[in-house]
Amino acid sequence: MEGPKSKSKGAWPPERLPVELFTLIVSYLPRSGVQNMRLINKEFDRKVSEALFRIVVVPFRPEIYGITPETTGSNDIPHGSIMLQDQGMRVFQGFGRWIKRFAMSFEIDHAKLANPPRKSDQEVILSFWGPYRWPFKTYNRYSQLEGLEQTADETRTMAKALKYICSAKELGLSIDGGLGWLAGPDINQRVAERGEKLVVFGASKFVPEPRFMSTKAPLKLSIQTTPAADQPGTEYARYLRMVLEAGIPEGEADAAVQMLQDDDRAGGTVLYGDNGPTDVPIPQAPDMWRPHRRQITTANSTVMDIPEDLAEVSDEDVDGDASLAVAGRSSGYTKKPSKHMPEACPLKPNDLTNAQREMLLEMEWAQNAFMQSWAIAIMDNHSTFSCIGKLNIARLPSRHLSILRREDFWDSLPALKCLSLAIIPDWREVKKEATSWVQDNRVAPSQAVVAVYDLLTQQIARREHIKELHFEWLCGGEYAPGLFARNQHILAAPVVAYAMHMVNRSQQHPILDLPHIEHLSLKNCWISPHILSRFLGPMRKGALQSISFDSVSLTSMVPQNAQPNPLTQAAVVQNAQIAQHGQAAVNHLFLQFQGMQNAFIGPALQAQVQPVVAPNPNAAPAWLESPRVGSWADIINNMTPSTTLEDIRHAREFGPEPEPKKPTKLTKLTFTSCGYARVALDFDQTALDPTIAAQPQPAAITKRIAELDSQMMKPLEAYTMATIVNHMDLAEVQTLENAWNMNVGWHHSHLELYNDALFDGLSNAGQGRFNGLIEIAQGPPSRRFSPRTTPEVPYGIFP
């Protein structure tokens, strides 16, 4: 009897601890610790998996469903066709029931775009005297990207995989094809050193990983264990692939490779004519998109060989977004010293190489196929996704918005209440010509405004069940790092059909109408005051309850009946100088002129010319005066559900009692780093000019700008894109601070962002930007509303 008892002393007592205790323990562990905790036994796996797989971001790879490239031998060289396995599908089937928030990502790696894998422009032809090389008759594809496109075309397979995500309440999507703004050599070292990864569902809920624990280190060693002759980046491997694709049997492949190498040495030719010398080591091309695989134990204790990427995506955050977890892994090769020194930054956004253009083209093909399959898979699983409450599109190129305009797609999400939309405007398009030459052409980023406006008007606005809407541009603005991106290239808010409708007041243009939206959020965009008035006026009278503005900038007031035109080049230069130095030069000349006058006036006469006036204690302070028409203070005063300037004047006995305000459902206004912006159009914008000269940029910043200018992208229709003005009139600052308790300037609220902006040469970063919250309790409002209100002018403030 004592024998069995002694054996059971060290055993785990099954089903003794409740799942709540497991959840509490998990909250104190890093993600790697939770993964190890799952492997203890079946009970741990069952009770921990719910927390570990609650939020999953799956990067799109050929192995995602268990689809792997067919191999042609021991060197594991893709042959072009694919075969279907069920291992990846078992991952979805086994863990799909735990997933509450599920997203898929398909993003280009800019490091790989800078150094794209090499591919031959010739193929091996067999003849009676032996093999020889000849240019391809048709366009030659990157095998890895071709495999991605083939996987993306598996629409039925994706629909089957998503069928197992039966408990999800939120769907996410993150796509970036590299056709938007490219930073290239314009890198902010502070941002780069932090190594922040792109997220879909926000910050992690797990404890950060200890610095001394690196789960990626062994992978670098595994890459180096491949024999040198078999490494995909070597000349031998490239020739071997060519001869195998030509149909030469594997047993005769080695002799054919040696024959081709001997011919090249005799003729003095190289395999890749325009891609540089063959003695320069290059990245291992096939490993760039093929993740490492490891074994895990599922809930039923079966061992499964699944992709390393898929095994690491079950996180809620940055770590869970495994689309970037492979970035460092794929570059784990060692370059040997060479006399051919590489360029400092091989990615020049304004002058891409042919290989880079081809990579962008094929990535676009693969992503377009993926988007089609993703949308169809959701439509085919309408019963599975009938309970989805939020759709979070964290990143999406504007060229793919047409796919989302399908009515049956939105009909498949009947319970959708919240939509978050972050769009990357296209800066270029890449096309393959009849000669197989790939050409890239610039496109106007403002065309994205049209695409978003069409989506919102055709599908979103008329759906009563969508109550929350968030929109933002992923292009330029305060949050974009780099000398050529920060504070620049801001697109108009998609509340009008075309960007120029924001400033064209020669006729009445249609405005986006969102009658069912209760919570509206806009980020990183510019808007004119009269359009903002027309946009929010009807919404305030409808269902709108809260508004959130994050880095939203107003322009100067556009005169009635004005139709501004783009500024000339000389005017643009002058406008930039005014934006930088303000009226400092004019003020300096005025002071000089005043000093010359005072030199001829006696001291007694000077005292008469400039008398000292004592302030009137009974007069209203300057900040209580009516604000400038079209300013933020004016907008807030007419939009706020709380106290207005008229209320304050009446309470301090400086004005009459205001009339009661019409009741609305609006109870909350949130402002985060909002201010003003300037557009390169010929209407009066002097109200935004600072009165104090800005500090000159350091010589190092000026030199860096001059060095990189020719390499950076130049937008078409630049006059539709705004530049932030880091200035606000002192009277308006006092009004915002005293009337609504706003905080003007970044101060300590945006310390990290402030330091990043300083690194990008902005000495006045955060000036003229304000933050604050205006909120009232729910209930019947007793606010007043101005009797000047008319249907044509919602707030009664714009002529």
Image: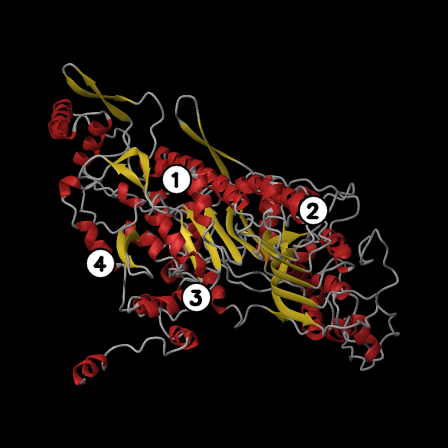
Q: CA distance from mark 3 to mark 1?
A: 30 Å
Q: Is residue 570 visible?
A: no
Per the rendering, the mark at residue 447 is: none
Frontmost of labels 3 and 1 is 1
Q: Earlier in the sequence, mark 3 or mark 4?
A: 3
Q: Residue 146: x, y in percent?
A: 36, 35
Q: CA distance from mark 1 to mark 2?
A: 42 Å
Q: Residue 351: x, y in percent?
A: 41, 37
Q: Mark 2 Cα within 10 Å, few/some/many (few <14, many 20+)?
A: many
The residue indicated by pointer 1 is 151
* Side of 107 where 550 appears, left or right: right
Asked if marks 2 and 3 touch (Cβ < 8 Å), the reply is no
Question: Element type at marker 3?
Answer: loop
Residue furthest front in the image: 1
Q: Residue 299: x, y in percent?
A: 34, 62
Q: Amino acid at mark 4?
A: Pro
Question: Element type at marker 2?
Answer: helix
Q: Mark 1 Cα within 10 Å, few/some/many (few <14, many 20+)?
A: many
Q: Quadrant of the N terminus?
A: bottom left
**Residue 605 appears in which quarter of the rendering?**
bottom right
The residue indicated by pointer 4 is 218
The residue indicated by pointer 3 is 204
